[in-house]
Image (spheres, rainbow, N blue to C red):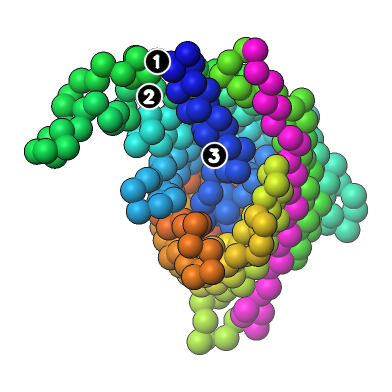
Amino acid sequence: MILKDKILTIIFLFLITTSIAQEMVFNSQPKLMQVSNPSFFGLNSWNRSGLLYNSTEINPNETQNNKFFYGSYSFDLLDFSLGIQFNNFSAPNIGYRKNDLNLSYIYKIELGNDMWFLPSVNVGFVSKNLNPSNLIFEDQINSITGYINQESIDPLADFFLAKSYSDLGASFIVHNTDFLIGINFDYLNQPNTAYDTDVEFLVPISYGIQAAYEFNLNPYDRRFLPRYSYLYAYSSVRRDSESINIFSSQEFQLGEFSVGINQQFGLFENFSFLNLGLSAGLTYENFDFGVSYAFSIQDLTNTYRYPPRIFDLYLSFDFSPFLRNRRGQYKRLQVDNY
């Protein structure tokens, strides 16, 4: 009975944790918009691939890591693109790992006047496991010397939890060369993510809204700014279960260099300013490299919550066939390659 109570306790606590934070929390959304909305894979029929390393400090003793890969390929004669995303998430302190593989089909429809509509359907496959053997149990601690034994006789130490499931999603974006609006829906099939087959824990449908506007800072080719200088403003709102995450950023593209700031807000019981981030990037030939760090903003009235500190490092590669014809044009919202 004691073993059963321990197992149920750890499952219950873990389900609460994962229900609050279903998605990866990262700063590089303006450069990796397809993470939030897979329809971005079809934007301007670009062919791209890239990597992202993300580290999130959710409290002083716990860090979560994401290793993310993505790729897209456009079938121009058939008016669609395919996208793939893979993310390896780990929380080493509690022995938790999760692998996500997502496949996306994006169709491209011209609405006229350089306006494009990109709907998509998405299928995801998820596997996760929790290995309590990585935890330190009470019988391992010597209260006199403070020494931690390598082995435990606690029956929960050898217990292993694993679960696999699939999820369905849909999304779309509408954009031209100046603005973009997108909406996405995830977990439309409401998969059961409970480790115990006798327990039902259905993930509620989540949804998000994205908006972006790009402004030319140097339309008359003045010398005090690089020829291709833009301000890219991006915002997204996402609802997961009972929480809402709000992200906004303002990035200056100054030729091949980019610098920006971003802010994240959370709404869970009350509204909180979570963190303030700085980002920098460099575009060279086919490569785009960037780094970002977000500082936590601690709300003294919410001592039970710890805003995350976030570090991002990404690298992307563009292998579009006609890239040389557009080299040096660093505008993000384009329609010339459809």
Figure quadrant of residue 229: bottom right
Instruction: For marks 2 and 3, give the CA distance.
Output: 15 Å
Residue 48 image offset from top left, x and y in percent? 55, 41
Nearer to the camera, 46 or 251? 251
Q: Secondary structure at mark 2?
A: helix
- Say left or right for 90 vs 24: left
Say what amino acid the circle numbered 3 marks.
Thr
Which of the numbered marks, if any, corresponds to residue 159? Answer: 1
Instruction: Decide: is 70 above or below 262.
Output: above
Residue 49 image offset from top left, x and y in percent? 52, 39
Instruction: For marks 3 and 1, give the CA distance.
Output: 19 Å
Most extreme residue toward the right is 112
Residue 205 image offset from top left, x and y in percent? 76, 36
* Discs 2, 1 touching: Cβ within 8 Å: yes
Say what amino acid the circle numbered 2 marks.
Pro
Quick one: label 3 or label 1, which is nearer the N terminus? 3
Quick one: label 2 or label 1, which is nearer the N terminus? 2
Instruction: Tell me the residue that label 3 is attached to.
Output: 17
Q: Which residues are magenta?
A: 198-220
- Say left or right for 185 vs 100: right
Q: Residue at x 65, y 83 (%)?
A: 220
- Say left or right for 50 vs 94: right
